[in-house]
Image (cartoon, rainbow, N blue to C red):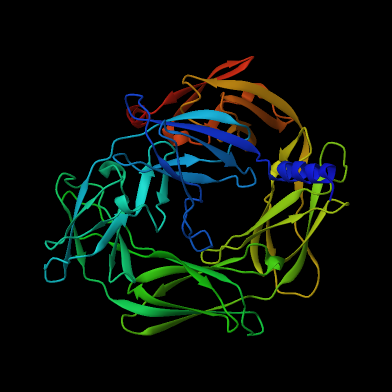
Amino acid sequence: MNLAAKFLLVCLACLQSKPDAILHLNFVDPSGRPVQATIDEQNSEANAGFTYQPHLRESNVDGKIDVAIDNSNTEGCCFVYAKGFAIDLLSMSFSQSRAMQVRMQPESDLSVLVVDRKGKPVSNARVAPGQIFFRRSAWISNVPNRLPDHFESRTDANGVAKLRGAIAEDLRSVRVAIEEERSCTFQIPERWDRTSALRVVWDISFGTLVCRVLDPDGAPVVGARLFANTNDEIVNSNVIEEPTADFSAFLGKTGEDGCVTIPNVPATTIDVRFLSPDKAIGRGEYRKDFAIQAGKTNLLEFRQKPLCNCLVSVVDVTDSASHEGIAVQFFLRDRIDNITGEARSNEDGVCEVAIQPGEWMFLINDTTLPEGYCVYYPERSTKFTVVQSDELQTAPPVYIGKGQLIEGKIVGLDMSEIRFDWISASSKDIRGMGRVNERGEFRILVPNHVELGSLNEFAIGNSSRGTLALESKAPWVLKWTPSEESKSNE
């Protein structure tokens, strides 16, 4: 191979590996001095359907590191670890390269006392953070199952562990493992004296769970992903009470026999879900509440329902044109089965889906709309009941059309300090959605028949952090006022 060909191959490889954006991070302490930090570039959820594998990278001594952003992952995020500071969480869904200073918060130790049912201290138990309410993003997220060593602790001979790496006020639960393979997450009561040790009573029995997934004909379903978590309520008290045991885990994929066997499941009522590998029903999700009996092998069986063929049309209300490639999302409205999926319209603007019997709702994925178009919400419902039948069934159409553009800016705070994911404008039952960039600028498309002067309600993607008030309609300026809690956390 000649030199020119090699150079061309190298250039092509570079182009293919070029990231969508680069996030230039600079970690500092509360006084602005550099902090050397470690980041975990994996998604925040350890039960996202794959066995969690940490992907740790360390900043330089000046606290700087560049992170490649994959914009195909719209909910990407990474954990940030630094000795002496609280665990932090950063969003990784940015549309363009940018620099970001991250001001780390000092950690505060939490003492955890682990005792057995008779009150005897349990030594050598592994204790780690469970769920944290992250100040930067206002998210509650599960900390990955594997952390750098200095964020975990072992109980001493007196059953006490010093849990580092999380601000005690923001910690929602702790994970405790006995004999490594037996573990539970304990919810922390909202009101307790956080200067005292959290007393965890290890009075937990375990059973074995066998989940079996069958298709409508009773044949095993291979490759279905199973998850579980408890549905116990969190105990709130003015004093430290025994926390509520919690179990949350990715259970695994079904094998050739359609089964997954999970040992050492806490004996409590758990909410078990499975995601079907069958693309014909989209990302099918089935759920069941199931009580685990201690010391027994508990069999839980899921059986898929038969599929029915259904059509849904995408109707253009402005010029009756047909649009290909628009994604229609469908949701099964059921208390237990939470089945969802998505299909693309063909050249005639029609989506063909195979779904199970039940009451369904159809919505437009507005990110697939043509330029200048938005969703039109008719008065009649987009709900449709699919019945068991071999005949083709037709659902009510979903409507799109050309919209009018609102461009504006959110003011009131330095936009580099907080990120708005989206914004919505509403008038009665009409709602327009738009994205907000890091400078606070937004673009919203609303249906042509909506009177812009009637728009008086706005919401942002992290509205729990504050409120929006309309300052001017020409140009559109919205003033954002952070909440008192948000102010105190900045």
Picture coordinates of residue 124, whole percent (x, y): 21, 65
Number of numbered callouts drawn: 0
Residue 477 falls left or right of residue 446 = left
Pick whichever, 82 or 372, lies toward us.
82
Residue 405, compared with residue 366, is above or below; it is above
Picture coordinates of residue 118, whole percent (x, y): 12, 71
Picture coordinates of residue 61, whole percent (x, y): 40, 34
Is residue 250 in sight in this rendering? yes
Residue 108, compared with residue 244, is above or below; it is above
Pick whichever, 313 or 161, lies toward us.
161
On the image, which quarter does residue 247 sit in?
Answer: bottom left
On the image, which quarter does residue 323 sit in?
Answer: top right
Residue 8, compared with residue 470, is above or below; it is below
Residue at image location 69% in from the left, 46% down from the top:
365
Q: Residue furthest front?
A: 2
Picture coordinates of residue 13, whole percent (x, y): 73, 46
Residue at image location 26% in from the left, 44% down from the top:
168
Is residue 378 in sight in this rendering? no
Residue 25 falls left or right of residue 306 = left
Where does the C terminus fall, quadrant-wise? Answer: top left
Residue at image location 54% in from the left, 62% down from the top:
49
